Image: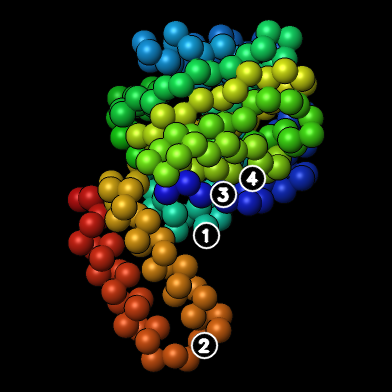
Amino acid sequence: MLLRVPNVLDDAKVRDLRRRLDGARDAWVDGRATAGHQGAQVKRNRQIAEDAPIARTLGDTVTAALERNPLFLSATLPARIYPPLFNRYEAEDRMSFGQHVDGAVRLLPGSGTQIRTDISATLFLTSPDEYDGGELVVHDTYGVHSVKLPAGDLVLYPSTSVHEVKPVTRGTRLASFFWVQSLVRDDAQRSLLFDLDMAIVRLTNDAANHASLVTLTGTYHNLLRMWAAP
């Protein structure tokens, strides 16, 4: 499932994150530091070092916003969220990230705990008119999808998807990226639960006393109980 989650961060939060990222000059490192063997061969960008204090501070800001976002929670059913990272693609070096698939398992820094990457996420921190190129392109069984969202908006897509970031030819593209281990491992099952949850929300808004709400809500939770990982 490819899904846009609008307004994860408001304009004030985006400005604050960008100001702090711009001021963290010593924390930016080669983006290949977190890439696997295949990804490192096609990755050309910069990112905030994972162990930099500002990475943890700003990552906590993003995570807190995610935990308050009903659409994100419904779509991902998160068991664990990898601490958000931050990257930049600059036109001067035509930075890009070629076609790749994210690694299936990542080690949470300093914890010894592993996280399965079911869902990949990109949170845009620059507006589309601030840079040329830099589209996130996701390849799936339904074709090729090009994504370039307003600052503060998030896109979710299965981590099994081949994807890439096109070269930036003007300006700078800033984003946060991370992965989610879902309670429901299977993407098709998550999609069905999401569709059912959205239908329940619409019915609640349109006919709050409808008798079918209890049945539908029960069905949702029974399916979640059946499919959720132990």
Q: CA distance from mark 1 to mark 2?
A: 20 Å
Residue at the disc numbered 2 = 207
Query: With respect to residue 217, does 131 lie above or below?
Result: above
Q: Which residue: 68% across, 8% down? A: 93
Residue 70: which numbered mark, if any? Answer: 1
Q: Secondary structure at mark 4?
A: loop
Helix, strand or loop at label 3? It is strand
Q: Image point 44% across, 90% down: which residue?
A: 210
Q: Position of residue 104 (x, y in %)?
A: 31, 29
Tag 4 residue: 153
Label located before the other in sequence (1 or 3): 3
Frontmost of labels 1 and 4 is 4
Q: Position of residue 31 (x, y in %)?
A: 54, 14
Counting residues from the start of the chain, the first of labels 2 and 3 encountered is: 3
Circle nearer the N terminus (4, 3): 3
Q: Earlier in the sequence, mark 2 or mark 4?
A: 4
Residue type beneath disc 4: Asp
- The three-letter amino acid code for the residue at tag 2 is Ala
Report whether 78 appears left or right of 155.
left
**For residue 69, what is the image quadrant?**
bottom right
**Up/down of 65 relative to 120, above or below:** below
Q: Residues within 10 Å of mark 4 (few under 14, many from 20)?
A: many
Q: Is residue 42 visible?
A: yes
Judged by depth in the image, the label closer to the viewer, 1 or 3, is 3
40 sits left or right of 27 in the view? left
Residue of label 3: 4
